Image (cartoon, rainbow, N blue to C red):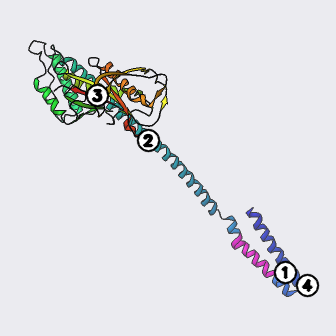
Amino acid sequence: MAYAIVLLFALTGVVLFDHAHRLTRFNATVRGALAGVLGVLLLAATALYVWPALTDTSLDVLQADLAARKGEINKLSAEKSLLSIEADRLIRDATAATHREARDMAALAADVAQVRWVLTTGPKALMADEPFPSGTTPQERLRADVLSLATLRAAPVTTASIDRTPPSALDALKGQMAARMTTPNYDIEAYPDRELIRGRAGRYYVVDLKNASSGVRFFFDGGKYTLARSSQEFRTALNSFVGEILSKFEGKVDYALFVRGSADQKPYEGTFEAGAEYRRIPFVRALGGDKYGVEMSERRVDGRVRNADLPDLRAAFLQKIVAETYPTKPPTILEGAVTPKTDNRDRNVELIMYVNW
């Protein structure tokens, strides 16, 4: 295309120059001179400007270089996206591994605590159940328990090695529970009323089981009364409480367990959850003023579950879990209540412990 344009300009210049020559021969000197000048100028412009401009390849090279750089930018952008996706995956995997490690550690601690409870409970206990000092970390507690069990296996079983928990162990535990006792799997807080149940004076404690990985208490979803998605973490927390607290009371002090559910005022109506059809729920009736009597009553739930049923259904669920984990002392259900507000924190169930000391 460039060559055709240059040829056209050159031919035009030649034609003008030839025309000037013809005009000069026919005595048209001025017109001939003008045509000759135009022809020379056109030929000179073609040679000096048109031809270099049309045959200059620097613009094509620049455009090609720009296209190549755009391709490199697009390639780097794609690689950046892939690296970002890979980084997110690695972060997720690391977070999941941390949570699994925490769950495995909590489950191992609960298993060791149960073994310790078996070996330290009853008149034929094989080892003394010394309390842990205040501030002992879960890792230190687990290490001490494992070392105790290893020492027990290595030592011969003799009459001298069979000992009961020293009397000071219960005193130390009582002192720890006088205020708020916090562990990775549960918190224990003294209840302000010494006679929550009429005629049963002593110390009452509210036990809040929680997820060891997140440190968050267990709550129920709206309209739900089981903890199916968190059952493993819940059982781990419950096992820790049984092994570390209840095992120390067995055969040494009078104690009892109670469960009390609650729900917020958000209306609900639905069906039973599969495998948890609690149609008859016996409970201790409330007297008012956060007091309970000794008379038993019963809640009957038909095929429809309503909001007013949720507190006692949640208590029945926890009662069943505790009884399966620790059949020695199945808890008693206290009549629950629906709070006058809408709050996720009111969708829970309390584990209450009574100790006669």
Closer to viewer: mark 2 or mark 1: 2
> Amino acid under label 3?
Tyr
Tell me the crowding category of disc 3: few under 14, some 14 to 19, or many 20 or more residues within 10 angstroms, Cα based.
Answer: some
Q: Which residues are magenta?
A: 36-50
Residue for badge 4: 26
Which of the image's four quarters has the C terminus?
top left
Residue for badge 3: 292
Which percent across, then down, holds residue 262? Answer: 37, 32
Residue for badge 1: 20
| Direction from residue 34 to residue 294 in the image, left or right | left
Sequence-wise first label, 4 or 2 = 4
> Amino acid under label 4?
Phe
Would you place residue 21 above or below residue 248 in this image? below
At numbered mark 3, what does the secondary structure look like: helix, strand or loop?
strand
Separation of residues labelled 3 and 4 (CA atoms): 137 Å
Which percent across, then down, holds residue 179? Answer: 19, 36
- The reply to whether the C-beta atoms of the residues labelled 1 and 4 are less than 8 Å apart is no
Residue found 48% across the figure and 47% down from its top: 80
Q: Dividing the picture into quarters, in which one does residue 198 lie? A: top left
Closer to viewer: mark 3 or mark 4: 3
Residue in the foreground of this view, choosing between 305 and 110: 305
